[in-house]
Amino acid sequence: KEVHNALNQCRKELGWAIGLSVSSTKQNEVLRCAMGIDVEGCKLFDSVQCTYNMLEQKPGEALLEAHNAGM
């Protein structure tokens, strides 16, 4: 929570965009969890970088959800 608040403060004061980079066997779960993080009524993450290729397509639905949510 403390880190979330600090990142949000950097966004407000410095104009940062906050990104998330995920690469694991559970990256779809991590991405969905991250999409639910709110700080002061705003989503914390603005963008996501995720492993997706011919061999790793598991996060496809979660990436589409993130895209549709504006990430």
Image (tube, grey):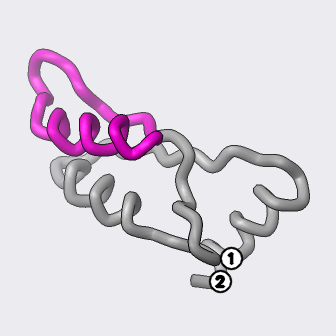
The image quarter containing residue 60 is: top left
- Confirm whether the magenta stretch covers residue 57: yes
Outermost residue toward the right? 13
Element type where label 2 sits in the image: helix
Element type where label 1 sits in the image: helix
Which numbered dot is residue 2? 2
Q: Residues under labels 2 and 1: Cα distance? A: 5 Å
Q: Nearer the viewer, mark 2 or mark 1?
A: 1
Residue 24: image location, x then y, percent: 25, 47
- Confirm whether the magenta stretch covers residue 27: no
Seen in the picture, residue 32 relative to 27 is either above or below; the reply is: below
Q: Residue at x 28, y 58 (%)?
A: 32
Q: Which residues are magenta?
A: 48-71
Relative to residue 4, is residue 43 drawn left or right? left
Q: Residue at x 89, y 52 (%)?
A: 14
For the N terminus, the image quarter is: bottom right
Seen in the picture, residue 41 relative to 15 is either above or below; the reply is: below
Q: Residue at x 79, y 68 (%)?
A: 9
- The residue that label 1 is drawn on is 5
